[in-house]
Image (spheres, rainbow, N blue to C red):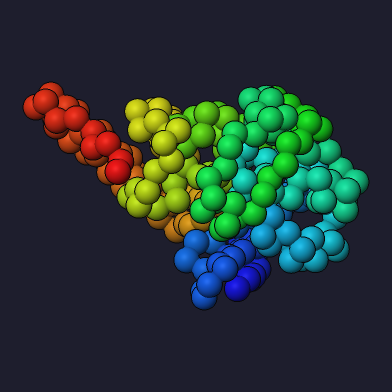
Amino acid sequence: MLVSKSFQHEQVTGFKYGYSPLGKPFLYVYLYYVDGLLIDTGQRKAGQQILADTKDLPVEQIFVTHHHEDHSGNIPMLRQQHNCTAFAPALTCEMMKAPPHMSFPRRLLWGVREPYAELQPVGNQLKTNQYCFEVISVPGHAPDMAVLYEPDKKWLFSADLFVNHYIGYMLDTESIQTQIDSTRKILELDFEVMFCCHNPQMSKAKTQLAKKLSFLESFFDEVGKLHQQGNTPKTPT
């Protein structure tokens, strides 16, 4: 089952996509368009719908926040459709040349993501006709992840930095301490709207991200205490 919706917030158009092989989707992916810039490309399972929804937009450039397949799944098709340049953090550009292995559940939920070698590394800023976005590295969830921040509009395009104020599950490649450091860095910024790629926060965005930081810090401290008590991780059976 494929679900798609669109919405408008200020000058930003959002696109929401969910796919499930059985029943209603339980996790959604958001893409954002503003002033000629398309932020992320979505999952391959929703590829044809994404192409249809964005075909009439004057997309002049694409920014990919990180290499994960729900963000990078449709880069070649969208580039061809709009005849534009796709930018990404330098590490994303390298990782996409030979992307890491995907588990079967991720392939089933998001679809495949082929290697791609034509991304262009972005600098510290990404400009459109009307806006100037700061590109800020936020490793932790992924080593290559970056967010876009527009200080005048107080917009934060937060990739997967937030997702929710707690963690439901984690990838084995994630780093809690690095996520804590990245979240603290972003909370120093002045933003009011958080265009999250899975759970946008149109109000009280900073409060929500602060709650996420509190969860991460408590989680990290508790695991540290258990480790000091001699507990060890359980080996999967």
Instruction: Reply above or below: 195 against 101.
Output: below
Give the quarter of the figure containing the C terminus.
Answer: top left
Residue drawn at the location 68% of the way across and 30% of the way down: 98
Task: Choose top left, top right, bottom left or bottom right for residue 226.
Answer: top left
Image coords of residue 53 (percent x, y): 76, 66
Between residue 165 and residue 22, name the one nearer to us. Answer: 22
Image coords of residue 212 (percent x, y): 34, 45
Residue drawn at the location 43% of the way across and 40% of the way down: 171
Residue drawn at the location 76% of the way across and 36% of the way down: 116
Task: Choose top left, top right, bottom left or bottom right for residue 132.
Answer: top right
Residue 43 falls left or right of residue 26: right
Residue 16 falls left or right of residue 219: right
Q: Can residue 69 be seen in this view?
A: yes
Image coords of residue 181 (percent x, y): 39, 28
Instruction: Reply above or below: 38 against 127.
Output: below
Image coords of residue 115 (percent x, y): 73, 36
Residue drawn at the location 58% of the way across and 57% of the way down: 108
- The number of discs equals 0
Task: Choose top left, top right, bottom left or bottom right for residue 93.
Answer: top right
Q: Can residue 180 be seen in this view?
A: no
Residue sticking out furthest to the front: 237
Give the quarter of the figure containing the N terminus.
Answer: bottom right
